[in-house]
Image (cartoon, coloured by chain):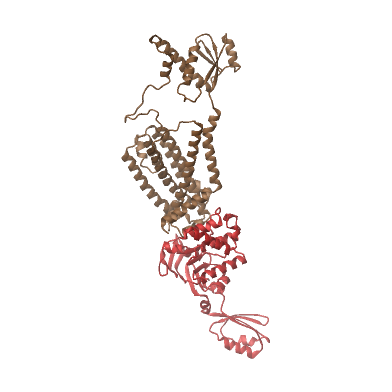
Chain colours: A red, B brown
Amino acid sequence: MLEIAGLAKTYGEVLALDDCSLTVAPGRMLGFLGPNGAGKTTAMRAVFGLITPDRGAVTWHGRPITDDDRLRFGYMPETRGLYPKMRAADQLTYLGALHGLDTTTSRTSAGQWLERLGLTERANDPVEKLSHGNQQRVQLAAALVHSPELLVLDEPFSGLDPIGVETMAGVLRERADAGSAVLFSSHQLDLVEDLCEDVAIINKGRVVMSGNVDQIKDASPVRHLEIEIADGGGEVISNLDGVIRSETVGRRHQLLIDAKVDVRSVLRDALATGQIRRFIYSTPSLSEIFLEAVS
Amino acid sequence: MTGWQGLALVARREVRERGRSKSFLISLVLTVLVVAGAFVVPQLLGRGPDTHRIGTVGDGNEPVLRAAEELAAAGLAEDEEPDTFLTLPYPTLALARAALEADEVDLVMVDGEEMILKSSGFSSQGGPVQLFQRAAGSVRLQELVAENGQAVADVVAILSSEPLRVSTLSGEDLEGDLRPLVAYVGLILMYIAILGYGTWTLTGVTEEKNNRVVEVLLATLRPWQLLGGKVLGIGVLGMLQFLLTLAVAFIVVRLTGLLEIPDLPIATLVVLFVWFVLGFAVYSVGFGAAGALASRPEEAQTVSFPLSTVAVVGFFVSFQVLDDPISPAARIASFFPFTAPYVVPIRNSLDGIAWWEHALAIVVMMASIGLMVRVAGRIYRGGVLRSGGRVKIREAWRQSDL
C-alpha cells in the first residue's frame, strides 16, 4: 500500500503541494487527475525521492520508503527519457539491472516485454531510430522490466494513438491484476473512468476528492435523467421536484436532478402518461465530477 | 543492491556504450594514427645518412674534413651509418662560388679557414656547418697539442664527450638523466586527460539531463552513484585509451629504433598513475557538477569555462615548477587540489619533494576529492532535474532536494 500523507512543497513563492494525501492499494489502479500545474508530477516525484517535501510523508506498507523499496517500484516520468543512441534491448537490460535483476534475468525480461509490445524486430535498434509511439512503448517497458510492485506513470497515454492507448491500458490492467499497485496521471478522464477502480483529484496542490470511482459517483448530489415519452410527457417533467437543470430536444428531456429524487416514482408517473421510449438514470461522469471539483 | 553495485553498473554502461560509440572509436583511431605518425613520418623523411657535397679551394681543408668525419661517426650506434662527405676540389674560388650558386655543392671550404654558404637560411645554423666548426676547433687543438704526441682521434674523442660530470646537492648523478623528460611528458598527459576526459564527463551529464533520462535513473539511483559511476566509467575508458596510445607509441618506437626507451623507475610511474587518477577525479567531479547546470550541450562549455580556466592556469603554473621544483610557489601549489595533480608528479620526478610533503599532498587531495564530491554532488542534485534554462550555482545549491 502506497500512502501519501499531508505532503507539502513550495518552490520559492509557488505552492506545488499543500496537504496532499492519497493511497494506492496493491492490485488496484488509481487515476490521478488534476489540471495542469495542480501538483501531480511533484507528488509522484516525491514517491521516488526526487523531491524532498517540506512536510508530510510517503510510506510503503506503512513505513518510510527505502532505497531497496524503490528497486521494486517502476516509474515513467512525464518527460520521457531514454538514452537516444543506446539499443532498446540493452537499455531495458541496463534499467532492469539497476533495479536489482541479474544480467541474464534482466535480458530475458527485456526480450519478453519487447515481444509483448511488438518491438522484437527493433530490439537492437537505437531508441532514436524508433517512432514516437515505439519510443513510448520502450519507455513503458523500462518501467515494467523488473515486474514492479508499485507502478507510477506520469501521463502514460499522452501522445499515443488509439492502438497505443489500448495496448498501454491492457498492460496496466494486467499489472494491477497481477497484484501491483498502479498510479497514473491522465487528462483522459473517460479512459480513467473505464480503467481505474480508484481516483484522486488534485487541485492547487491539495487532493480535493479521492476514493473508489463508483462510490465517488454515487456520492454525487446530482443525477442525470433522460426521458423520452411517446406523447411528449411534458406534465411529468413539469411536476417533478428537484430539477436543477432541464433541456428539451423534440420529445427528449435531459434533466439534471437532485440525487434525492425518488426515480422509481418518476418512472411510475412516466409509465402512467404514455409509452416510454427512453428512460436513462445515471450518475454524473467522472469528467463532470472533476470539473465540479476543480472549479 | 548496494550503493557501490549501482555505481559499478553506471560505470560499466559508460564504458560499454561510450566504448563502442563511433565518436570514441574514431577519436581512438585518430589518436593512435597521430601518435604513430609523429614517430614514423620524421624517420621516413630523414631516413639514412646524408651525403654532403663539399667544394674545396686551396690547402688545409683535408684535416678539417677528416676530423668532421670522425666527429660524425662519434656517438652513433653500431648499426648506424654516419654522414659522409663528398669532396669536390676547385682550382679557383670563383669556380667554387659558381658551383655553390648552381647547387652543385652544399658549401665551399677555403684553405681550412673559411666556409661559404649559399645563403644565411636555417640550414646555416646546424647540420654540417656546426660539425665543421667543431672539426676545425679540434684540428686547431690538435695542432696545439701535437708536440705532446696526441693523436687527432684522441682530441676528437675528448671533444665529442661531455667531460664534466654533473650532479646536484643531493648527490645523485644526472648523467643520462631522463627524469625531466618524464616529468614533462607526465605533465602533458595530465593536462590532456584532465581537459579531454573532463569534457566527456561534462557533456555526458548534460546529455543525460537534456534527454531527461536522468529522472528515470534517479528514481532508482542516488545522485552520487550516478555522478560517481560516470566519472569512474569515463576514467577507466580514458585510461584504456591512454594506455593503448602509449603502447602503440612504445611499439612504434621499438620497431623503428627511433628513440632509446629508457628504463623508467617503477616508483615514478606509480606516482604518475596515482596522481593521474586523483587529478582526473577532482576535475571530472567538478565538470560533472558544471554539466548539471547547463540546459543544453551547447551551453556546457560556457558553464564549465571557470573550471577549464583553472585547469589551463594550473598547467602553465606547472612549467615554473619544472624549472624550480623546490620553490615556495611549487610547495604551495602542491596542496591546492587543482594544481597539485600537475605539480606533485613533477616535483616527485625531479626529486624535489620530501616524502612527508608528498604524503600530506595525497591526504589533502583525497580530502579535497571527498569535499568536492559532496559539493559537486549537491550542485548536481540541485541542477540535474531543473529544466528550462541554465541553473545558477546558488540556486542549485539551495534547491538541492535529493
> From what the image shows, is residue B364 above or below residue B217?
above
Most foreground residue, A94 or A258: A94
Q: Is residue A83 above or below residue A206?
A: above
Q: Nearer the viewer, residue B301 or B288?
A: B288
Q: Is residue A290 left or right of residue B372?
A: right
Against A110, residue B298 (above or below) is above
Q: Residue at x 49, y 47 (%)?
A: B200
Quarter of the image for residue A138 reads bottom right
Residue toward you, B294 or B21: B21
* Residue A73 horizontal/vertical position (percent): 47, 64
Pick out the residue farthest to the bottom: A272
| Residue B86 point in image, percent of width and height | 55, 16
Q: Is residue B253 above or below residue A53?
A: above
For the N terminus of chain B, the image quarter is: bottom left
Count of numbered circles on the image: 0
Residue B160, position as x, y percentages in the image: 43, 20
Query: Closest to the observer: B389 or B183?
Result: B183
Residue B243 appears in the picture as rendered? yes
Based on the displayed image, in which of its 4 quarters is residue B360 positioned?
top left
Which image quarter: residue A9?
A: bottom left
Which quarter of the rendering shows the C terminus of chain B? bottom left
Q: Is residue B132 visible?
A: no
